[in-house]
Image (cartoon, rainbow, N blue to C red):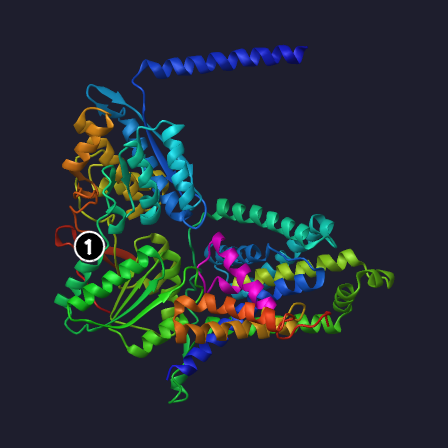
Amino acid sequence: MIFKAYLRLATVLVHSAVFVMAGGAYAEAPSIRIGAPLPLTGPLSPEGTKLKQGYDLWVQEVNAAGGISVGTDKRRVELVYYDYESNTPKAVQLAEKLVNDDKVDFMFAPFGSGSTKAASSVAEKYGIPMIASTASSVEVYDQGYKNLFGVFTANDTLTEPIAELVSKKFQNIKKVAILARNDLYPLALAQDFSKSAIKRGLEVVVFEKYAIGALDHASALTQMRAARPDWIIATGYVNDLILIRKQMADISLRAPLITMINGPAYKEFIDAVGPLSENVTSAAWWHPTAKYKGDDVFKSAENYTKLFIAKYSSDPDFTTAGGSLIGVVLQMAIEKAGTVDRAKVREVLASSKFETFFGPIAFSSVGQATSYTPPIFQIRGQKSFVVHPPEIASGELQLK
Amino acid sequence: MLVPQILANGLLLGGLYACIAVGFSLVWGVTNIINMLHGSFIVVGAYAAFFAYQTLGINPFVTLPVIAALMFGIGYLLQRTVIRRVIGATVLITLTLTFGLNLILENALLVAFKADYRKLNLAHPLGVIDVRDYVDWLDVVVPVDRLVCTLVAVILVVAVYLFLRFTNIGRAVVAVRMDGRAAALMGVEVNHIYAITFGIGAAIAGATGTLLSVIFPISPLMSSSFLGKSFVICVLGGLGSVPGVLVGGLTLGLVESFGAAIVGSEHSLTISFALLLLLMVVRPTGLMGTRAFQ
């Protein structure tokens, strides 16, 4: 009996607590809810964790400033996220759930080109603006969708400037060897590299693909060594590139110029290969040393880096910054529209240019950013320096 | 001429493969348990070596016996407390148990170390041996760390073989494998022997992880790759045959290496699994397999 009485008392207490909390929440304008499917477990969990760090930092900064200004109101931001376990069909299901059960106002896309393309159909069906942080392949934007906006420029905006820089600066670089992960984005990127090189009169002497999950690259690298290339290009993700760089040293494969994408932009790469990272060049959509200034909550790349290090005790990279950027862009669009009306926010997104810590962001007619040149950088003394474009550079491209 | 280098690559890769699979084969062969934890044990060994080097500065080749001993203890206890309950049960039960334990261990590793890739970088890398310095016409470069791992793998395989052949406990392990009930009647303490076998499997996995930390980037997600390779090698070499692991590992290394060179690296996994299917049809006992443990 006593137990039952306690139980009843507890129930009453819980109810009144809920009532008080709800009352408190209703006293101010309701928060803006943003839905985000994230790959927090499974093979993409390193990337998913980075994206979430980027989102969380933006939410923290916005809410610390009182929220997003909507007309005369300040409205706080609430992120609703689910783990899609690096499984694209599940990302699509969760996008549906975010719309129907969680009633989110806006959406952030899942990680990468493939799952963004898949989940964007949900956003389009319900007319919800979806901003994508990490979808760079042009095929994502070829469906005529009106609600999808991607902040990464197309893959060839990474390959063209590097090839141009190399062919202008170093006439003695003639033979190119390419090793690509046999996967949508890395392979597309490698093919763009090949095109960019051939266009400038360079010769692609080896083009090898490796399987997803490969534990050994010795055969492909042996063939490369026999071709004596001047420029080695490897595409893949950070674990692939760590192993490839190590195995290049294992069989004494050397070249004056080594380019690897994506990996060297992450600090793990430099930590993992140590001195072998020397002179490796790469490109990414953002870099902590890029000297951009913006009108957003972060104000500059430098300030963003400072805030990120203070919160996570690690350096930000293009993935974390991409996560924060899509929050920034959504915030700027809502503030400019002065409303959370989805159609009006979408119009502002489609027609405006946003000056941000990430660089200037404006979207093409299909919704992909075209407004900035991704930085090219090179690692020296286990630190990386931007070498292109000149307006944000802090060093010059060197050969080994 | 690329052939000598590709041959060297294949043999060195094969040595690593043998190293990865030997503990797995022993446990499967003797206790008839498919130890799904094997890949994660390797990862645990790799992390132990990584942190020992990073925080205490101890060379992985020095920590190897310590890590092996610790892993033996863990394996022994795990067998005595949990796994012994399913000895003699059907394959599905034992598989489910170790699969579940592996899920727990893998996720614990994810929580503890995150999914970031790390790699142990020796302050003084072991470097490479350029054979051209000794033999003019032979264009082969051999990475010393892989060579050492291959040698250690061979030593481990030989040591396990000698242990089973010439020690009392080793003979008891073989006896239990042949007929557990008869062995018990002869005074062999069967549960103890099972636990020792499992402990040895874990110890070898830990030692392997230590060696691999110098070669591969490590992350909790690597365990499934190691487990997958272990399966293929055991079936290729023949279950229950310790020398078979060496043969299976080297065969797989050579096939993948030449396969990648001939038809392209992207098909090397396809080739190894095609070989596995072919062998299961033509010679289901594996290259060196026998029905009973020797």
As drawn, A5 above or below A158: above
Q: Is residue A20 above or below residue B204?
A: above
Would residue A109 be seen by someone viewing this image from the given angle?
A: no
Q: Name the image quarter holding residue A84.
A: top left
Is the magenta region chiefly helix, strand or loop?
helix
Name the residue rendered at 75%, 64% in the picture. B177
Asked whether residue A327 is in view, the answer is: yes
Q: Which region shows up in magenta?
A: B211-235
| Helix, strand or loop status at disc 1 | helix
- The residue type indicated by label 1 comes to Thr
Subunit ID for the residue under disc 1 = A
Q: Is residue B231 magenta?
A: yes
Is B173 placed above or below A35 here?
below
- Figure quadrant of the N terminus of chain A: top right
Spot occupied by residue A50 in the image (x, y as percentages of width and height):
36, 44
How far across and down, in percent of the image, does residue B81 sit?
A: 71, 48
- Magenta stretch encompasses residue A97: no
Which residue, given by chain and number where applicable, does mark 1 sit on?
Answer: A157
Q: Residue at x 43, y 83 (%)?
A: B4
Q: Position of residue A132 (x, y in %)?
A: 28, 42
